[in-house]
Amino acid sequence: MARNEFDKRLSDRWDTDKDRKASNRDELDTRNRYHYDEESFYQRNRGTVKDIDEMMDRLDFIMSDRYDMDMDAKFAESLLDVNDIRPRSDPDSRLDRIEKQLDELLKNNIRDAEPAEKQSSVRRWILAAIGLLVAGGLGFAVYEIMRRQAKGEGDSDIDVPAALKAKLQELIDKWNAAPDPTFWLDFANAIDAGLVIDGKQQQFTIADQVVFLNLTIATCPLKELWLWDSAKDVESNAEAIKKYFDASKKVSDIYRNVMEVKYQGKSMPRAVAAKQLQMVLSWILAGEQE
């Protein structure tokens, strides 16, 4: 079967039978494709990103061929579905079937994926979200620091220099404070741009995007309670988002326009919007709404 943007599998991973310079070129080219917009988060904070990139280049506490099981365990936990921003659905309801479909997608393509595939996935998300170029083995550490800093949790058990943690904290604070329209526009541009592997452009798969959205949820905790009146409201809201894809057949348009879809006159917080977008992706993956 030909690989395409609706594939359930993760995109091909970086660092496969390549020297480090070639891999760096792929990642740098990918970042340039993502963040070409001068208003993007990366462009507005590229000085801080450059400082962090240089710090990570000097680190050798995790080699590129070393696999950290502890970091993987924390990473895997962050990929689990987040249900506290959605009303409990009735068994065998449409919403319940969507949740099960997403769980199955995560199980088959993430929880059972090879370590190198998981590393590549988290590095791609970090690159898309904030523009950092992360060496293979550092991906889990950097992501876990991001996740904990966003939630105000301690990270003293993660063995990286304090200066790096401080710079990451500075960047994450800015990232979470950035307007949501900027975040979703950056995300849409990343989906349009795709990624570069072995010097060739590839498209992100649906599996990639579901993972990216779960990581977004994990690093963007809700600042205030969000309530849906009913499961039907959840579906209707997601259907309104999907209409942008139906009109253009471009997956990126669901991200580009998600802030246009309100609920009771309010824009959805980043984490809530991410959950809605996952529902839309499940419909796109299925090819049609039930």
Image: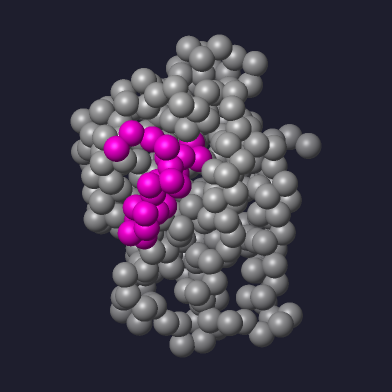
Could you say which quadrant of the image residue 107 lies in?
bottom right
Q: Is residue 46 visible?
A: no
Q: Position of residue 241 (x, y in %)?
A: 47, 65
Q: Residue at x 50, y 65 (%)?
A: 275
On screen, residue 188 above or below 67: below
Give me the residue at 37% from left, 58% from top. Answer: 153
Query: For this view, does 13 lie left or right of residue 165?
Result: right
Residue 182: percent from the left, percent from the top?
A: 29, 50
Q: Is residue 96 above or below residue 121?
A: below
20, 208: nearer the viewer:
20
How many numbered marks are there? 0
In which quadrant will I find the C terminus? bottom right
Please state the horizontal and vertical placement of residue 105, each as a whole percent of the image: 69, 55
Residue placed farthest to the right in the image? 1
Whether residue 70 is visible:
yes
The stretch in magenta equals: 139-162
Q: Is residue 101 magenta?
A: no
Residue 56 to residue 20: above or below: below
Asked where in the image residue 224 lies, by quadrant, the reply is bottom left
Q: Is residue 41 above or below residue 133?
A: below
Q: Residue at x 52, y 23 (%)?
A: 63
What is the residue that sits farthest to the front in this orientation? 157
Tell me residue 53's x, y (percent).
Answer: 33, 27
In reply to whether residue 158 is colored magenta, the answer given is yes
Front-most of residues 251 and 98: 98
Query: Residue at horizontal 66%, vertical 54%?
Result: 106
